[in-house]
Amino acid sequence: MKQVKPFIPYGHQIIEDEDIDAVVKCLRSEWLTTGPLVKEFEGALASFCGVRYAVTLSSGTASLHALINAMSIERGDKVIVPAITFVATANAVLFQGATPIIADIDPNTLLIDPKDVERKITDRTKAVIAVDYAGQPCDYDELLTICNKYNIYLISDACHALGAQYRGNYMGTFGKGAVFSFHPVKHITTCEGGAIATNDKDIYERSIMFRNHGIDIDFRQRQKREAYDYNMVMLGWNYRLSDVQCALGLSQLRRLRKWIEKRRYLAALYRELLKGIDEVAPLVELPYRVNSFHLFVIRVLPHGLRDKVFQFMRRRGIGVNVHYKPIHHHKFYQEYYKQYYSNGQLHDIAPNAQMVSSQILTLPLYPALNDKDIKYVVEVLKDAIKLYL
Ligand SMILES: Cc1ncc(COP(=O)(O)O)c(C=O)c1O
């Protein structure tokens, strides 16, 4: 009987016995939330990234929201975001009533283009959000120079790039603050979850309050002081990450370096196998960086071929994906930007993003894959190109 190959998704978590044991141990303990494992996970994350503070939150999106709030970004302010990113990057700006302004990306890397950032700065610009797309750090030297010149904040959306490095420093250390996501397809998981990394005490303290309804001291602190009174001093949310999730995060973090090495190995194998396929261009890797490869993204160059390849590979059980449709191509944002741009203008705000949006394709990449899986993916990709070219 012909053996059917199991579906290969584009990303997948690894959960091992030690993760399950850590979660069960927490479930049997006194503290399911607001307990000691939250601080322990935050300490381990901060020390991994080389920053003073880490604050865990219920998602990467909540982390972006809390960080933007902590910078007092509000209605009337503008925040520059890259055209190609997950919608959460721009949505978090809107949560604070501020306006996301789209900057174009470099078509070779899909990273925000510092020159377009500078062009789009006005006297209402408060911050720039740099997204380390697919795990490759942005040009932080240039972005920091621009942000310092105009006295605006740099925010690092490193949701794709936990463990990546720029000039020898880990993501988390750049800008006023950085955010990570622990969704199952990311480098480590807490099921849902995220964190802020920062060296700024004020950002740290405000984020801690913001995730706990804007209350000045939490339940554990009140218990320690044998006090019942607390004050809500700002408007906040319940964005806490539970101890159960932090138990999982702590356990996963111990294997992060090993998993990044595996991702980098598999990405190098893809590169090798894709050499000589003229119709396909992997994203360009820049110097002075360690890419932590959340995703492996290629551009399928001939006009109209990407969608055909996508469908062919899906039919053959390969979970290729597209990251992402440009922000301003989404229905919601098309409606939203009507107040700023005519239809024609909106079409032209990010020509590189426009061009690559019909080319990009994410191939499966996660540490549980092996050489045979990667070779199979590339064989199927070649079959698709041969069939449709
Ligand atoms: C670039 C980027 N920013 C923010 C987020 C939001 O993270 P989360 O899904 O944990 O809310 C994601 C999630 O995929 C992302 O890719």
Image (tube, grey):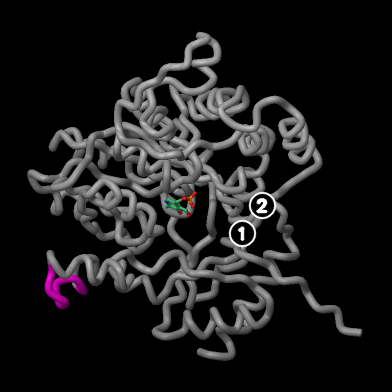
Identify the element where label 2 is drawn. loop
The residue that appears at 34% across and 23% down in the rendered structure is 200
Give the quadrant of residue 368.
Answer: bottom right
Label of residue 262 in the image: none
For badge 2, the amino acid type reads Gln
Crowding at dot 1, Cα within 10 Å, few <14 / some 14-19 / many 20+, comes out as many
Which region is colored magenta? Answer: 341-347
The residue that appears at 54% across and 72% down in the rendered structure is 276
Residues 226 and 318: in front is: 226
The residue that appears at 46% across and 30% down in the rendered structure is 55
Is residue 342 part of the magenta span, yes or no?
Answer: yes
**Residue 377 placement (x, y as % from top left):** 66, 71
Residue under numbered circle 2: 13
Vertical side of 264 occupied by 373: above or below: below
For badge 1, the amino acid type reads Gly
**Residue 54 placement (x, y as % from top left):** 47, 28
Residue under numbered circle 1: 11
**Residue 68 placement (x, y as % from top left):** 30, 40
Vertical side of 5 occupied by 141: above or below: above
**Residue 114 placement (x, y as % from top left):** 24, 49
Is residue 91 part of the magenta span, yes or no?
Answer: no
